Every structure is written in structure tokens, then in C-alpha cells.
């Protein structure tokens, strides 16, 4: 038995952790919706460039599945990603990823209610252990910077988690029932999601596209390199891997594995020479135990 979906989910968690750390460096350059538009637009172009080189069977997207993917894009990308960037700016990567760990149980409940996709007891145990482990790793003081008590940031994080869980279940239904290639599904979701943000931002902000242009022109080549790297791994590659995971794995399991991103943040911290606590190490071990329950 192969675990294509589960492997893709772990890969998505890894690259999303890298991208989250990079995005946190740019949260002061753009508003959350502006950053969402930039990353979504560039990632869409990347996907369009790769699409002709992938094995793409003759497929016709039925209008109802196009609508379903569109709804998923609006909820998961337009609303969810904008809320995610807003939380990232206010409470930092660790706390934001902590709140994202609430998505797996939400995905399981939504899949059970709307798709009838029941989990085995062992898988539910894996969901619980992994979620608790991820929470224990990330729920630590942020070196006294006070960002953990920003209620608006926490609210944005909770909104991002809820939208992510909802978007995952909706996208899973469209990919499986419509038998759509993951990359095509990711492109449709992303394009519609970015279009929705672009239409809304003109009402929420004053001259947002002028602000985007001004900030982009003021960025150095080095900044552009880092931002493009974050978009490639965090939006293009992570979204593609996420769609593969959703097509070939149960949405609750896929979302739980994707929620291990905070563990990969620890690796980034270790590479950067930052101290890792014993609590983080213990939490990581239990998270690995939880993940292993999906494969036994």
C-alpha cells in the first residue's frame, strides 16, 4: 500500500514552515490582503508555466465542480490566507501555526458530517496525539515580546484555521468526485481566490494597488529573491502538494500531517542556532508517534 497522499502532506508541512518563516520577514512591507494578492498572482503564473509539462489526461471540468473549487478558493485562500497573514503579522509564526493546528479536528468533523468520510479509531487517536503534540511544541513564551496576547491576532488565527478546514473538505470533494488533476485543481482554487481578494481589497483599503506597486519598486533584489522563494515553496509547491494530499488521503489525516509545520519550524530555529527547549523535543517525539499511527 502506497502513501502518496500522506507523503505529499508531510512535504507540504515542511515547505510551508520554510515559507512561513520567510513570509514573517515581509509582514511589515504589505498588508495581509496585499501580500495575499502578490503571492497568489505570482504562484498562478508559476503553475501555468508548469502545467504544460505535467501529465494531464483529457479532462473536462464540469461547471458544478468549478463552482465547488471556486467556493473552496474563496474560503480557503481569499479569506483563510488573508487571515493567516494578518495573524502572522500580529502574533508571529509560532502562535499562528499553533492556531492552525486546530484545523485537523475541524476537518475530521466536517468530513464526517458532510462527506460521510469516517475515520478509524486509530486514525482519530493519531489526530488527537499529533494535535496535542503540535500544540505543546508551539505553545511556549515568545521570549517576552508580548505578541501572544494580541486578541485580534488570535481571532485572525482562529478564522484562518476554520477557513482552512472548510476549504480542505470542499476541495477534497471536488478533486475526488470530479476526478481532477491536483495541479489543475490548485490553479483553479488559487486563481479564483486571488480574484476574490483583488475585488474586495479596493473597498477595504485606500488605493491598494498603488501601495503594492510602490512597495514592490522599493524592494531590493535580495528581498525579491527571498519573497519569490517563499512564494515558490509556500504557495506553488505547498499548494500543489496539499492538493495531491487531499486527492489521495482522508482530509482529516492530510490536514493533521500538514499541521506538523511547527515541528519543522524547530529545525529552522536549530539551523539558525536558536535554543530548543526540552519541551519542544518531547513534543516532537510525541508528534512522530501520532503520525506513525496513520501508517500502522
Image (cartoon, rainbow, N blue to C red):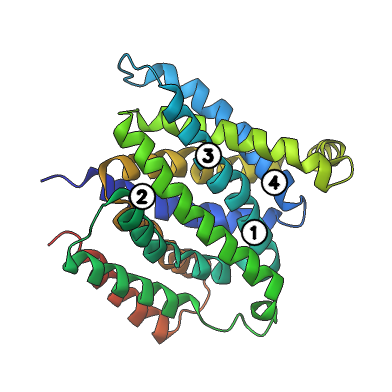
Residue drawn 37% across and 66% down?
Answer: 105
Q: To which quarter of the image does residue 60 belong?
A: top left
Which numbered circle lies on residue 35? 4
Label 2 environment density (alpha carbons within 10 Å; few <14, some 14–19, many ≥20): some
Dots 4, 2 in contact, CB < 8 A: no
Q: What whole-number distance in Å separates the C-alpha atoms at marks 2 and 3?
A: 25 Å
CA separation in Å, label 1 and label 3: 27 Å
Give the image location of residue 99, x and y in percent.
52, 69
Q: Which residue is mark 2?
A: 11
Identified at 54% across, 35% down, the residue is: 190
Q: Secondary structure at mark 3?
A: helix
- Give the foreground label among 3 and 4: 3
Q: Nearer the viewer, residue 217 or 94?
A: 94
Report the quarter where the C terminus lies: bottom left
For the view shown, which residue lies furthest in the top direction?
Answer: 58
Find disc 3 in the rendering and name its residue: 71
Left or right of residue 86, residue 268 in this image: left
> In the picture provided, is 191 more to the left or to the right than 165?
right
Residue at point 58% right, 42% down? 74
Residue ID at (61%, 80%): 142
Mark 4 and mark 1 lie on one chain; the one further toward the N terminus is 1
Instruction: Say which element carries label 2.
Output: helix
Distance Cα–Cα, label 3 vs label 4: 21 Å
Q: CA distance from mark 4 to mark 2?
A: 23 Å
Q: Give the mark nearest the N terminus, 3 or 4.
A: 4
Spot occupied by residue 268 in the image (x, y as percentages of width and height) = 48, 63
Please tell me which of labels 1 and 3 falls first in the chain: 1
Q: Which residue is mark 1?
A: 24
Whole-number angstrom distance, CA of label 2 to CA of label 1: 20 Å
Amino acid at each position: 500500500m502506497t502513501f502518496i497522499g500522506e507523503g505529499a502532506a508531510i512535504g507540504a508541512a515542511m515547505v510551508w514552515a520554510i515559507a512561513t518563516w520567510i513570509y514573517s520577514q515581509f509582514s511589515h512591507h504589505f498588508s495581509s490582503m496585499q501580500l495575499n494578492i502578490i503571492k497568489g498572482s505570482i504562484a498562478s503564473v508559476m503553475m501555468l508555466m508548469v502545467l504544460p509539462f505535467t501529465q494531464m489526461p483529457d479532462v473536462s471540468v464540469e461547471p458544478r465542480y468549478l463552482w465547488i473549487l471556486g467556493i473552496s478558493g474563496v474560503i480557503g485562500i481569499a479569506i483563510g490566507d488573508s487571515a493567516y497573514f494578518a495573524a502572522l503579522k500580529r502574533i508571529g509564526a509560532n502562535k499562528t501555526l499553533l492556531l492552525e493546528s486546530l484545523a485537523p479536528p475541524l476537518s475530521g468533523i466536517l468530513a464526517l458530517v458532510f462527506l460521510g468520510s469516517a475515520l478509524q479509531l486509530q486514525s482519530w487517536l493519531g489526530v488527537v496525539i499529533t494535535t496535542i503534540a503540535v500544540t505543546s511544541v508551539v505553545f511556549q513564551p515568545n521570549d517576552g515580546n508580548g505578541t501572544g496576547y494580541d486578541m485580534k491576532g488570535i481571532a485572525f488565527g482562529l478564522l484562518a484555521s476554520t477557513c482552512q478546514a472548510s476549504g480542505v473538505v470542499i476541495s477534497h470533494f471536488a478533486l475526488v468526485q470530479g476526478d481532477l488533476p491536483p495541479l489543475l485543481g490548485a490553479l483553479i482554487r488559487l486563481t479564483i481566490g486571488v480574484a476574490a481578494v483583488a475585488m474586495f481589497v479596493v473597498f477595504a483599503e485606500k488605493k491598494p494597488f498603488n501601495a503594492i506597486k510602490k512597495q514592490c519598486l522599493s524592494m531590493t533584489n535580495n528581498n525579491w529573491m527571498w519573497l519569490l522563494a517563499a512564494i515558490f515553496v509556500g504557495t506553488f509547491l505547498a499548494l500543489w502538494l496539499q492538493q495531491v494530499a487531499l486527492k489521495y488521503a482522508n482530509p482529516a489525516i492530510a490536514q493533521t500531517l500538514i499541521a506538523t509545520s511547527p515541528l519543522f519550524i524547530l529545525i529552522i530555529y536549530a539551523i539558525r542556532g536558536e535554543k530548543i527547549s526540552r519541551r519542544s523535543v518531547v513534543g516532537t517525539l510525541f508528534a512522530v508517534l501520532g503520525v506513525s499511527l496513520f501508517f500502522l
